[in-house]
Image (cartoon, grey):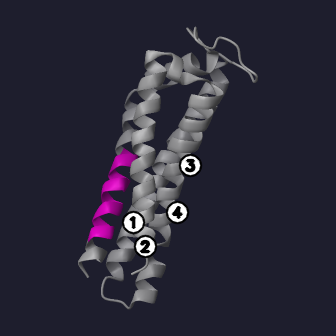
Amino acid sequence: MHIRYLKIMIAIIAAGMALIYALQNIANIDAAHGAFIYVMSGAEHVAYPETMFFKTANSSVAWFTLVITLVGEFLAGILLLKGAIDMFSSIDADSVQFNASKKFAEIGAGIGVLIWFGFFGVMGAAFFQMWQTQIGTGSMNGAFQYFVSMALTLFFINKSD
């Protein structure tokens, strides 16, 4: 039974993380937009100045990418909270029902993995080479921490009851 409570608490903590980062990004929306343009434009890329793909400083592309990020962060947080509520509602149920109640928490954590690994790790770090600048490295390192947190949350919650 104690593991069920831990799964619920971890889902709540992961939801809080996703929602707080989404809200912090909104509170600093112009800075976030600027960071996206900075990374996507290849500004100050000295070590690997060329790319096999493309660079862009297009404001609309940066806004689009930022909106996808924000929607993903909010969605991850909301689904993790829904999953925590569902798990709490099934706390005294049998294993089959409790395992089924984890669905939204698992999806929420999975979306967190997609945003912070897929979007930041693959697109930002690999595609746009964000590791070449201080701003990009800071974002990349933070995203790696969030990705690992979400991946561990997903694995732990997904563990059969």
Callout 2, which amino acid?
A: Lys
Residue 123, given in percent of the width and then of the height, sits at 62, 34
Residue 63, given in percent of the width and then of the height, sits at 59, 28
Q: Are marks 4 and 3 in contact (CB under 8 Å)?
A: no
Callout 3, which amino acid?
A: Leu
Residue 55 at least partly seen: yes
Q: Main secondary structure of the magenta part?
A: helix
Residue 77 at least partly seen: no
Q: Residue at x 41, y 44 (%)?
A: 146
Q: Does the magenta portion include 86?
A: no
Q: Are marks 4 and 2 in contact (CB under 8 Å)?
A: no
Lateral position of residue 43 relative to residue 93, left or right: right
What mark, if any, has residue 114 been given in the picture?
3
Q: Are marks 2 and 1 in contact (CB under 8 Å)?
A: yes
What mark, if any, has residue 156 been given in the picture?
1
Residue segment shown in magenta? 6-19
Residue 139, given in percent of the width and then of the height, sits at 44, 28
First reached walking from the N terminus: tag 2 or tag 3: 3
Q: Secondary structure at mark 2?
A: loop
Q: Residue at x 44, y 19 (%)?
A: 135
Other residues around mark 2 within 10 Å, as few (<14) / some (14–19) / many (≥20): few
Q: Secondary structure at mark 1?
A: helix
Callout 1, which amino acid?
A: Phe
Q: Residue at x 28, y 75 (%)?
A: 3
What mark, if any, has residue 159 been given in the picture?
2
Q: Secondary structure at mark 4?
A: helix
Q: Is residue 120 above or below residue 7?
A: above
Task: Give the labeled residue for mark 4.
Answer: 107
